[in-house]
Amino acid sequence: MRYKAVVVLLLLAAPATAQVRKEIRFPDPPGYQVLKCDFHMHTVFSDGLVWPTVRVDEAWREGLDAIAITDHVEYRPHKEEVIGNHNRPYELAEGLARHRNILLVRGAEITRDTPPGHFNVFFTQDNQPLDVKDFYEVFDRATAQKAFIMWNHPGWQGPERGRWGEEQTRLLEKRQLHAIEICNGDEYYAEAHRMATDRGLPMMGSSDIHEPAPTDGQEAAGHRTMTLVLAKDKSLPALREALDAGRTIVWYRNLLIGRAPQLKAVFDACVRVESLHPPQAKTSYVKLTNQCDNDIELERSEPGQPRKITIPAHVSVMVRLSGPDGQAAERVAYKVLNFLTGVDQPLTVEIAIPRPASQPAAAAAAAG
Ligand SMILES: [Zn+2]
Ligand SMILES: [Zn+2]
């Protein structure tokens, strides 16, 4: 009896075990699914402070769809205690990832002095052969496994040491460099952003998290730095196809950074435009609704009113839009100040002003 009472008490005292997931909301553009991805993070198998399964739980809690655990191959400060090989982080996390429906990509971080710096290889089959001294040999071996290769945090040790070097040129020529991490944790590297746009390489953003993620899910920016990937479905092959096609957008603080077609597709999916009133002689009243987790900051790119419109995340605003001559317009052009297609280059969008819903016949008759 006494024993049973203790068990009951223990059960009552046990904390709720339900895990809470904070969903990230970016509506899907037609034909695509917006996958929220982080392809750069560490565990105790290199210089991180958590076990691999913890990264999966954190990803689930923070609303991610896909992750790569990318422990350093050459730098393992806990190797006396944590003796598993370079595949163990993936193998240990794989079962839980499947259970949580998180796509887990096998990967590792190639860690050389800067320059040439650090590179993440992911979509590998076996990380063991990557533990080799010769710099170029690593990439030949990764490419033999059809890995996707990203140059990490180019500006980490300052713009001078993070410059594009002969190693990057040679890797690019050998098709062994596929993307550049332009945002890493709390940092944005304008130079790296320029390198990516100049060479047409996909832009990536990641957390490079080493410590446990904050348990309340509240980073200063409200979300971790990540890459939004426009994939045809939520699967590893679709994710890889989208990366190869460069359909990536970096979500960093209150900025979305990518190529114009993807940013445009996400903008169109996020912003709903509705007519509120029949058009007046000079103005159109519209309701603009922001259906995504990022604020949208607009600035008119032609004469006309209003000059600026801010639509906070998940909020609607009503505005009176007028054309360049002060008259009602069918379309108006705006710059999206926090959607960047290049360094300091905002996306330009055209907002088509919908016709008001047709008047009910009775009302029309009464008005006539
Ligand atoms: Zn690194
Ligand atoms: Zn790292």
Image (spheres, grey):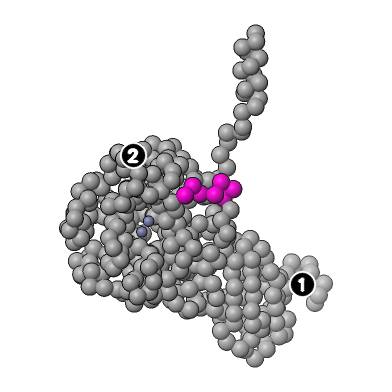
Residue tagged 1: 364
In depth, the one of 40 and 66 nearer the eye is: 40
Q: Dots 2 and 1: beta carbons under 8 Å?
A: no
For the point 63% across and 60% down, the residue is: 314
For the point 49% across and 67% down, the residue is: 256
Q: Is mark 2 within 8 Å of ligand 2?
A: no
In the image, 289: left or right of 154?
Answer: right
Question: 10 Å neighbourhood of mark 1: few (<14), some, or many (≥20)?
Answer: few
Specify which label sits upstream in the sequence, 2 or 1: 2
| Helix, strand or loop for disc 2 | loop
Which range of residues does the magenta coloring cover?
A: 211-217
Answer whether residue 215 is magenta in the image: yes
Q: Position of residue 88 (x, y in %)?
A: 31, 40
Residue tagged 2: 82
For the C terminus, the quadrant is: bottom right
In depth, the one of 8 and 51 nearer the eye is: 51
What is the chief secondary structure element of the magenta stretch?
A: loop
Q: Position of residue 340 (x, y in %)?
A: 48, 73
